[in-house]
């Protein structure tokens, strides 16, 4: 890897605006956001409801495009990619956890987790093995054969997390992945994210909780579609995060 | 993703939505089955009419006296048909395309008695021996009377199958005597049963020598009909022309006459009329069937459309997880194909089973082209409405698809 590539940001958003509707009903969800995230960073995005967090996340995940402005993923302008290339990027590079889970109805948790691997062309037996492992990681090994409507909100959320992680993507984008979880499950999920980050993966997560944000090394705050602060957590916070993680791990693997 | 994997995904999708899959299959099944079966019923009834008219013989002309009262219950109404006229028509040099000529007198609804049993004979016919072959009757047992019987005024009779059964049941009728309006006739033959051409039973008749019937039942008035048999079905029109000119000459009809005292009915024409009636019937049933196909189609469309919201969301999820448009489309196409083909084939199977039964008095006969048409249309509808919403959804950005309502 050349020095040039190493310095290039993974995510590079340049003055992105997202405007919904037209005329009187116009909603400015993003009012010019510029943001760069480098390889291996762990970023938390915070902000009140309706501040544009999910909108930004969808753009980062190549699920939506900004009305104006540019978005470069690994130096490539996403708006220039065709359907097949976008599908490849979503499938191989990004693991996305939706705020509203978005599991496929009437399909087992296992099959839901298998899905991204199926599109990646992983063979069935291997898929099952890895899907089971991922469900195990989020503490749902015994719910593999349950369908979404047979799972609690928190369980569905964890299936969604397992689905995003199962392909071991270099970039994990999680929209409130712990929004519906109790302390224990939150700890499980955060432990997974932390270990992914430690193995060099880039993580962006949205959260309302300071505790969760503390796990990140950088916190970005949005107000009315604008970035109002972009802070790196200090050494203290980082070590606190590590300490918390150890505590959680102890709790999990007790 | 491999095609095998795509098919597995599609099947899993179908199983995951059992009710929707079932309703779609049902819609297609009913549409296809109804079309095939209704057309088969129409076709079956047309076939029956065709066969029965053909069994009457397509190479005969029936000459009756003019006016519309020719089928009155007595044969002695004012007509100008005579045995001499019949003899003239049989003249080989004047009418080379005429094979046989049978003068006919008919007595309708005569009571016939054998021992304690009595039946009403639909028509008691006095004629020449050629009548049987000309009207496509064959002898089942015994024999037809001969020209000698006609000359000798023999009181012998050949019974139609209905009359024979009614009078004799299991007894052998040959050689038995029956009483017809006080006159005794000896049964010398029984006719083989003939298919019905409609309302009347063609087997409800008895045939006896013309002379004997005139002598004992109808009197020596004029004839009810003259049955002319052409040499072949192709010569029927030529024969008709020959017969017409002889009749005109004998009956003094000039080219200026506004009407003729006789009518000629051509079996071939009758066949055409009846067949075209039957065709109209088939077309009508076809239209009903087409409507049911349309309704079935709308049903399918409806089910597919109702699930568009849900499916669009699903497509959004699949795309977000990295499914290319092509893969999503293939999955939905396979789903729709499986449903349409299963529904279509079940419909055909249902129609084939249904056609084993008699429906509206006819035995349905399946028309192969209706099978193709019904299958084609319903599979087409299924494929289109199965894949069109999918292709639209697959073109959306994942977020747009996820927000679809
Ligand atoms: N499809 C849309 N059409 C119109 N307005 C929209 C649409 N999606 C989002 N918005 C608006 O954009 C704004 C930002 O929405 P967004 O979902 O990004 O909020 P958020 O920060 O994720 O909020 P929350 O914390 O509640 O999830 C909101 O005011 C919302 O009403
Ligand atoms: Mg949100």
Image (spheres, rainbow, N blue to C red):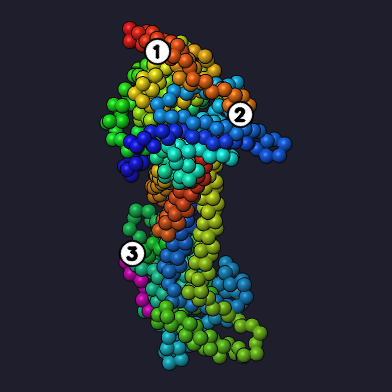
On the image, the x and y values in percent for residue A39 come to: 40, 29
Query: Which image quadrant for residue A158?
Result: top left
Towards the viewer: B10 or B259: B10
Q: Is mark 1 within 8 Å of ligand 1?
A: no
| Residue A73 drawn at (x, y percent) | 45, 37
Chain designation of label 3: B
**Residue most toward the front?**
A3
Examine the structure image and report whether residue A80 is included in the region drawn in magenta: no
Is B143 magenta? The answer is: yes
Q: Residues within 10 Å of mark 2 (few under 14, many from 20)?
A: many
Please state the horizontal and vertical placement of residue B403, each as a whole percent of the image.
56, 34
Q: Position of residue B347 (x, y in %)?
A: 42, 47
- The residue that mark 2 highlights is A225
Q: Is mark 2 within 8 Å of ligand 1?
A: yes
**Quarter of the picture holding the C terminus of chain B:** top right
Residue named by callout 3: B140
Quadrant of the frame with the N terminus of chain B: top left
Does mark 2 fall on the same chain as mark 1? yes
The residue lying at 45 percent from left, 56 percent from top is B373
Residue neighbourhood size for the residue with mark 3, other residues' Cα within 10 Å, grouped as few (<14), some (14–19), many (≥20): some
Find the distance from the CA under tag 3 to the CA under tag 2: 101 Å
The residue wearing badge 1 is A242
Q: Are marks 1 and 3 on the same chain?
A: no
As measured in the structure, the alpha-carbon distance from the residue carrying label 1 to the one carrying label 3 is 108 Å
- From where the camera sits, is residue B57 visible? yes
Task: Tell me the CA gap for discs 1 and 2.
Answer: 31 Å
Badge 1 sits on which subunit?
A
Is label 1 in a helix, a strand or a loop? Answer: helix
Q: Of residues B38 and B157, which is closer to you in this image?
A: B38
Tell me which segment is drawn in magenta: B140-147
CB atoms at circles 3 and 2 under 8 Å apart?
A: no
On the same chain: label 3 and label 2? no
């Amino acid at each position: 890897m050349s020095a040039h590539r190493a310095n290039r940001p993974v995510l590079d958003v340049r003055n992105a605006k997202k405007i919904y509707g037209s005329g009187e009903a116009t909603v400015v969800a993003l009012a010019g956001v510029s943001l760069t995230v480098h390889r291996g960073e762990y970023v938390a995005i915070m902000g009140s409801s309706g501040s544009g967090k999910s909108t930004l996340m969808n753009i980062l995940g190549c699920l939506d495009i900004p009305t104006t402005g540019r978005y470069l993923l690994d130096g490539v302008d996403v708006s220039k990619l065709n359907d097949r290339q976008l599908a490849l990027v979503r499938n191989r590079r990004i693991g996305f956890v939706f705020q509203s889970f978005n599991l496929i109805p009437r399909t087992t948790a296992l099959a839901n987790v298998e899905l991204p691997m199926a599109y990646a062309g992983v063979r069935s037996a291997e898929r099952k093995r890895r899907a089971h492992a991922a469900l195990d990681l989020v503490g749902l090994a015994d719910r593999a054969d349950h369908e979404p409507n047979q799972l609690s909100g928190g369980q569905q959320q964890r299936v969604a997390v397992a689905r995003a992680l199962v392909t071991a993507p270099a970039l994990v984008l999680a929209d409130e992945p712990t929004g519906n979880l109790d302390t224990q499950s939150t700890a499980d999920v955060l432990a997974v994210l932390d270990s992914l980050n430690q193995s060099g993966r880039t993580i962006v997560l949205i959260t309302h909780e300071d505790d969760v944000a503390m796990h990140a090394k950088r916190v970005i705050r949005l107000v009315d579609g604008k970035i109002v602060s972009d802070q790196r957590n200090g050494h203290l916070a980082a070590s606190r995060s590590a300490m918390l993680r150890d505590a959680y791990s102890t709790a999990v693997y007790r | 993703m491999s095609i095998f994997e795509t098919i597995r995904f599609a099947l899993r999708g179908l199983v995951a939505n059992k009710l929707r899959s079932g309703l779609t299959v049902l819609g297609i099944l009913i549409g296809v089955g109804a079309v095939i079966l209704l057309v088969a019923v129409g076709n079956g009834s047309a076939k029956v009419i065709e066969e029965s008219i053909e069994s009457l013989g397509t190479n005969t002309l029936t000459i009756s006296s003019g006016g519309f009262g020719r089928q009155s219950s007595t044969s002695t109404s004012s007509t100008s048909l005579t045995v001499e006229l019949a003899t003239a028509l049989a003249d080989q040099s004047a009418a080379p395309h005429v094979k046989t000529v049978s003068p006919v007198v008919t007595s309708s609804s005569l009571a016939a008695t054998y021992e304690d049993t009595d039946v009403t004979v639909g028509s008691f016919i006095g004629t020449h021996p050629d009548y049987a072959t000309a009207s496509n009757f064959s002898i089942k047992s015994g024999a037809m009377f001969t020209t000698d019987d006609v000359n000798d005024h023999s009181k012998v009779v050949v019974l139609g199958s209905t009359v024979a059964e009614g009078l004799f049941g299991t007894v052998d009728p040959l050689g038995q005597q029956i009483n017809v309006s006080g006159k005794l006739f000896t049964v010398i033959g029984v006719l083989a049963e003939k298919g019905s051409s409609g309302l009347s039973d063609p087997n409800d008749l008895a045939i006896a020598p013309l002379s004997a019937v005139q002598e004992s039942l109808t009197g020596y008035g004029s004839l009810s009909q003259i049955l002319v048999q052409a040499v072949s079905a192709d010569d029927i029109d030529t024969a008709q022309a020959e017969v017409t000119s002889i009749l005109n000459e004998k009956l003094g009809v000039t080219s200026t006459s506004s009407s003729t005292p006789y009518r000629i009915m051509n079996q071939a024409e009758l066949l055409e009329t009846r067949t075209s009636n039957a065709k109209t019937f088939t077309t009508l049933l076809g239209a009903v069937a087409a409507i049911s196909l349309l309704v079935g189609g709308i049903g399918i469309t409806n089910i597919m459309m109702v699930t568009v919201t849900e499916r669009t969301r699903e497509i959004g999820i699949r795309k977000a997880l990295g499914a290319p448009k092509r893969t999503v489309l293939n999955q939905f196409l396979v789903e729709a194909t499986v449903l349409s083909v299963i529904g279509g084939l079940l419909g055909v199977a249902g129609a084939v089973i249904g056609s084993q039964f008699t429906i509206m008095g006819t035995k349905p006969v399946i028309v192969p082209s209706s099978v193709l048409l019904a299958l084609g249309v319903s599979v087409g509808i299924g494929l289109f409405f199965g894949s069109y919403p999918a292709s639209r959804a697959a073109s959306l950005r994942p977020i747009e698809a996820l927000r679809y309502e």
